Image (cartoon, rainbow, N blue to C red):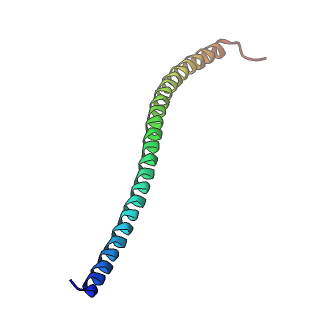
Amino acid sequence: MTRAEIAALTRRVDSQDETLRAVADTVVDVREIVDGHTATLTGHTATLAEHTRLHGQHAATLAEHTRLHGQHAATLAEHTAMLREILRRLPPAS
């Protein structure tokens, strides 16, 4: 192999080495971004689980309040009927 061929081969190897290093740096950058996104996704998943749990609690509380509202409405209707009967029985105002 001549000196010129060796020099050309050295330049090609150096060029490939630079390309390989650039690709490796890019892979490292992408990996760091993916790791950051994974951490964000983990946090969002935990937040979603907490919100889902709270939603379940709120749904149960709303169901209880709805039930109580129904009871109160029935009691109010009974009291209204009683008051009407009392007013009906009262002598007329003079």
Tell me if residue 1 comes above or below residue 16 in the rendering: below
Report the quarter where the N terminus lies: bottom left
Front-most of residues 21 and 29: 21
- Above or below, 27 relative to 76: below
Residue at x 50%, y 31% (from the top left corner): 58
Residue at image point 47% right, 35% down: 50
Q: Nearer the viewer, residue 28 or 51?
A: 28
- Counting from the top left corner in percent of width and height, residue 43 is at 47, 43
- Residue 86's place in the image compared with 10, above or below, is above
Res 94 quadrant in image: top right
Towards the viewer: 78 or 53:
53
- 38 left or right of 90 in image: left
Where residue 77 appears, as percent x and y from the top left, is 55, 21
Where does residue 92 sit, x and y in percent of width and height? 72, 16
**Is residue 59 shown above or below 83?**
below
How many numbered markers are drawn?
Answer: 0
Toward the right, the furthest residue is 94
Residue shown at the point (37%, 61%) measured from the top left:
27
User: Residue 31's spot in the image, x, y percent?
Assistant: 39, 56
Residue 86 picture quarter? top right
At 34% from the left and 71% from the top, the residue drawn is 17
